[in-house]
Amino acid sequence: MATIEVNGKSYETDEEGYLVDLSTWNEEVGAYLATTEQVNMTEQHWEVINFLRDYYNEFQIAPAVRVLTKAIGKKLGADKGTSQYLYDLFPYGPAKQACKIAGLPKPTGCV
Amino acid sequence: MSEGAIKKFMFVNRKAPYGTVYALEALETVLITAAFDQDVSLVFMDDGVFQLKKGQQTKGIETKNFSPTYRALDGYDIEKLYVEQESMEARGLTEDDLLVDVTVMSRADMGKLMEEMDVVLSC
Amino acid sequence: MLHIINKSPQERNSLDSCLRVTQSGAVLLIEDAVYAATRGNAAEAKLREAMGSLKVYALGPDLDARGMSDRLIDGVTAVDYAGFVDLVAEHPNCQSWL
């Protein structure tokens, strides 16, 4: 277990830096987690983060990359539903980086 | 797994959720299997039918409610869900009580379907 | 005596065994055993018959978790965790059928 400090509040993370309790997440925490991943957050990044959080709330899992790509294409437009688009935003892997920033656990089937 | 060799996988779910960890473990295995582009079927029989019951609220037992995840299976291209009719009826349930679309099948047809599989995992 | 059952009636025979030997007292159904207290399940008739001489309770949070609280058999009393503790305290002894 580790903790991170954001605006004077501390949050528990696992040894890989994923938030332990996703209900404690807020945008400041997301922005902080993004800095630990060296991701400069833009509107396009937040769009994916919000999509992931909605997906998790609905299905209680973080989607596999293939599933995320397809679902994003359906919801946000075909031009965004490509792995190229998602890897441009999150170079070290949308599953790994975007899920971490969104405060979600590491995706099941992340192989 | 060698490329192009698509096998028919079947997961046979026979346990109620929460009382044991089988149901959740099986579901996670199914999600991982989906990454390998295999032909996956899920069967719910005996107490396994209870996994699909609508309206699960687990706050009181402080356990994660994983029933919404069955509705994500469609997005993972897992669309073959079968429920054994006799098991469902013996538990006072109907198709309307289930939280996903399934094919209800008699036990005789279920046996035939199992025969067609390459790999069957019962949990 | 308070008898506590935690296994589904259609997977294990703990409820059967309990009802076979028990003539009085109370049965508390918890965890997967709560399915026995729901309308239309295969153990319903057996449970109703037992209710002639036994008081039957089911743990509410376990019914909720399984989405079954709206189909509790009439005459079965749902209890919460505090009610669980009360039942144990009220009875001179209890047995967990594992």
Image (cartoon, coloured by chain):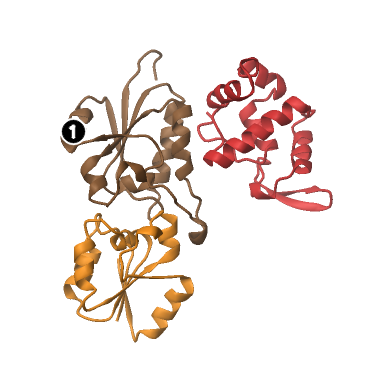
Chain colours: A red, B brown, C orange
Residue C64 location in percent, x, y? 44, 58
Determine crowd level at label 1: few under 14, some 14-19, many 20+ residues with C-alpha closer than 10 A. Answer: few
Q: Kindly identify the residue that appears in the image at 74 percent across and 44 percent down.
A: A26
Kindly indicate the quadrant of the structure image that contains residue A36: top right
* Amino acid carrying mark 1 in the image: Gly
Residue B97 visible here: yes
Point 39% across, 85% down: residue: C90
**Is C5 placed left or right of A61 in the picture?**
left
Is residue A96 positioned above or below C5 on the image?
above
C65 vs C26, left or right, is right
Q: Pinpoint the chain carrying mark 1.
A: B
**Quadrant location of the N terminus of chain C in the rendered image:** bottom left
Specify the quadrant that holds the C terminus of chain C: bottom left
Q: Which residue is mark 1?
A: B111
Q: Is residue C50 above or below residue A52?
A: below
Taking the spot 37% from the left edge, 34% from the top edge, the residue there is: B101
Percent of width and height locating residue C22: 20, 77
**Element marked by disc 1:** helix
Asked where in the image residue C89 lies, by quadrant, the reply is bottom left
Q: Evaluate whether residue A1 shows in this view.
A: no
Q: Is residue B32 above or below residue B53?
A: above
x and y percentages locating residue B97 in the rendered image: 36, 46
Residue at the bottom extreme of this rendering? C92
Report the front residue among C69 and A20.
C69
Extreme top residue here? B4
Residue at the spot x=65%, y=15% of the render? Answer: A79
Question: Which of the 4 image quarters holds residue C34?
Answer: bottom left
Side of B40 relative to B90 (left or right):
right
Q: Nearer the viewer, residue C13 or B70?
A: B70
